[in-house]
């Protein structure tokens, strides 16, 4: 019996020490990477169908041209972006603080309402559409940032685009969710050279969407006009889906009527 007690006594400090190490490991928080570049992969059953996520708020700031400001995302958004609530069912837009607050509460409580859609009958391939959503005007500018989403080739895509209200030109496009083919369609999130093509393209003409993404020509470069960009090589379907999603949200069934109201209010 004495030998047993002695063995326990000898092992007890070691076990406590190890327990303390594991507790410390599980509760400690390593230095977080820059949220603007952090990417999270959510693996599914199919190795080719990883859902890749970036920080939503940091993506919003990047699209708005505010990603170089060193502060918390919430403070930068509050100081530099004016939220506006779009109601698609009413065809209206408002900056009412109470209306925005009510919408945000409904969103947090998973009570935000949607309208079912036939995915075959809309460019974005949506099965449902939110009745309301928030858009953002960059303060002291004519630029608005719009959330976009829709069916990609292999996955559901979510992102933001920044549009100049007066000229109808794109300022920037970024995606924060995608699960397209790695090293092909997945480039919609990471290929900066491809994403730079969107800058300055005229995507709204006389109130109608006008973006075209065409298959790159290896033998002879495409002649691109002010509405056209090259697609991602080897990812024709994903490129086409991005075109459809953007044109849907800039059209009559998306933000089109809202953009016309905002443009009139600007003039």
Image (cartoon, rainbow, N blue to C red):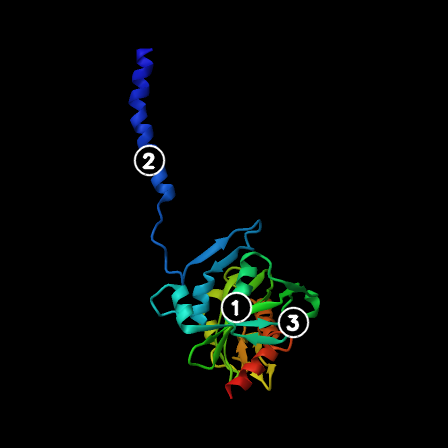
Residue topped by disc 2? 20
The relative height of residue 43 versus residue 217 in the rendered view (above or below) is: above
Disc 3 is placed on an element classified as loop
Residue topped by disc 3? 89
Measured as percent of width and height from the top left, residue 203 is found at: 55, 80
What residue is drawn where x is 52% and y is 68%? 98
Which of the 4 image quarters holds residue 253?
bottom right
Q: Sequence-wise, which precedes: disc 1 or disc 2?
A: 2
Measured as percent of width and height from the top left, residue 34 is found at: 37, 60
In this rendering, would 128 be left or right of 77?
right
Residue topped by disc 1? 98
The answer to whether one can see residue 191 in this image is: no
Q: Are marks 3 and 1 in contact (CB under 8 Å)?
A: no
Label 2 crowd (10 A; few <14 / some 14-19 / many >=20): few
- Which-is-in-front pick, marks 3 and 1? 1
Label 3 crowd (10 A; few <14 / some 14-19 / many >=20): few
Disc 1 is placed on an element classified as helix
Measured as percent of width and height from the top left, residue 60 is found at: 46, 68
Q: Measure the C-alpha gap from mark 1 to mark 2.
A: 49 Å
Label 1 crowd (10 A; few <14 / some 14-19 / many >=20): few
In this rendering, would 252 be left or right of 3?
right
The relative height of residue 240 versus residue 267 in the rendered view (above or below) is: above
């Amino acid at each position: 019996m004495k030998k047993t007690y002695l063995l326990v006594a000898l092992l007890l400090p070691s076990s406590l020490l190890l327990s303390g190490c594991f507790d410390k490991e599980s509760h400690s928080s390593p230095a977080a990477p820059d949220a603007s570049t952090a990417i999270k992969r959510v693996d599914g059953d199919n190795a080719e169908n990883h859902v890749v996520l970036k920080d939503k708020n940091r993506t919003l700031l990047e699209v708005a041209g505010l990603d170089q400001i060193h502060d918390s995302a919430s403070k930068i958004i509050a100081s530099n972006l004016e939220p506006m609530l779009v109601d698609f069912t009413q065809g209206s837009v408002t900056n009412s603080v109470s209306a925005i607050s009510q919408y945000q509460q409904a969103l947090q409580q998973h009570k935000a309402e949607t309208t079912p859609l036939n995915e075959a009958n809309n460019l974005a391939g949506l099965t449902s559409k939110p009745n309301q959503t928030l858009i953002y005007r960059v303060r002291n500018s004519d630029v608005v940032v719009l959330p976009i989403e829709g069916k990609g080739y292999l996955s559901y895509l979510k992102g933001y685009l920044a549009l100049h209200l007066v000229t109808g030109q794109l300022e920037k496009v970024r995606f924060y969710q995608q699960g397209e083919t790695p090293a092909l369609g997945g480039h919609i999130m990471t290929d900066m050279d491809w994403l730079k093509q969107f800058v300055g393209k005229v995507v709204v003409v006389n109130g109608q969407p006008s973006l075209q993404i065409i298959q790159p020509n290896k033998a002879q470069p495409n002649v691109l006009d002010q509405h056209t960009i090259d697609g991602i090589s080897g990812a024709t379907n994903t490129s086409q889906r991005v075109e459809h999603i953007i044109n849907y949200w800039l059209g009559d069934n998306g933000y089109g009527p809202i953009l016309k109201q905002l443009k009139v209010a600007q003039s």
